[in-house]
Image (tube, rainbow, N blue to C red):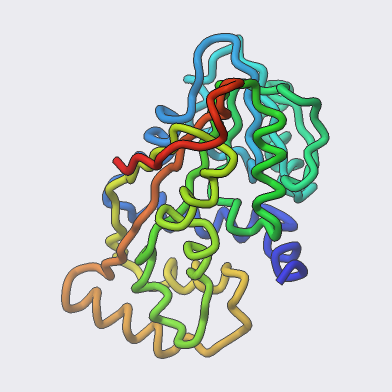
Amino acid sequence: MAERLQEQYATDRNLRSRISLHDAYSVNGHWFDWLFDREAPGPGARILDLGCGPATLWLVNRERVDASWSLTLADLSAGMIEAARHELGDRATYVVADAQELPFPAASFDIVIANHMLYHVPDRPRAFAELRRVLVPGGAFHASTNGRGHLAELAALIPGQNEWSYVEAFGLETGPQQLEPFFAEIRVERFDDALAVTEVEPVLAYIRSTSRYRGEDLTSARKTVEAAIARDGAFHVTKSQGVISCRRPQPGTGDGAATIRV
């Protein structure tokens, strides 16, 4: 699995292919705006975006980035870091880093962001301990991820594939209890959205971009999508995504707190 992930994220090509499907066919096309509103801190904040990918969050919201922020973009993939650097230049600091062993001093950041990446981390408790270590007491941690049923109609196009099982590793339903030993004030916010895809090829391109696709014949998938578009006007796909937010506890307040689902 680790080798497949390295291949999958060696560059930003596969990720951009998947993002393009959402950009073109999401019913609610404001995911990155919504996410930015929940993750953006106050003036002068020191921010770590862990697993930043090609810095899409910051590119979409380029005009809203406060000049007083100190922004550090980190990713395990050097290819992703180069893609981010190409887009943002000197507006950020760039680091190739493993979430399980962060190369930063304690209490280095006021806010840490980990968007759609924690389900890839082999030892999440170790990563959570590191995330807590580099946050200041009271600092915020935001992790976007998917929920159960996310892209279920896409997953059904390839019988036996398991690409969308990451939600069981770290999803909206399974993530909060993993965070409780390390963080406080845990809450979940969901983003209301779906896909209404009116062309077949973008669906097939999405499937081919996933880490589990190994050249399977997509004729059946093509026919299923074509039939749905002919019948309903679009191939409708469920989306379940959102963000889990929490804080590093202040000294003397204990390690965790009850999860609040919103």
Residue that appears at 65% across and 34% down: 132
Is 169 rendered above or below residue 179? below
Number of numbered callouts drawn: 0
Task: Residue 192 in the image: state x and y as whole percent.
Answer: 27, 48
Is 64 rendered above or below residue 23? above
**Quadrant including the N terminus:** bottom right
Residue that appears at 42% across and 30% down: 38
Q: Is residue 19 left or right of residue 83?
A: left
Task: Residue 205 in the image: state x and y as whole percent.
Answer: 51, 69
Is 230 rendered above or below residue 142? below
Q: Is residue 203 left or right of residue 47?
A: left
**Quadrant including the C terminus:** top left
Name the residue nearer the viewer: 156 or 110. Answer: 110
Q: Is residue 56 left or right of residue 134?
A: left
Residue that appears at 66% across and 50% down: 125
Q: Is residue 230 left or right of residue 139?
A: left
Name the residue nearer the viewer: 37 or 86. Answer: 37
Give residue 33's quadrant in the image: top left
Task: Residue 91 in the image: state x and y as whole percent.
Answer: 68, 21
Name the residue nearer the viewer: 70 or 256. Answer: 256
Residue that appears at 70% across and 42% down: 83
Is 137 rendered above or below residue 103? above
Task: Residue 62 in the image: state x and y as whole percent.
Answer: 53, 25
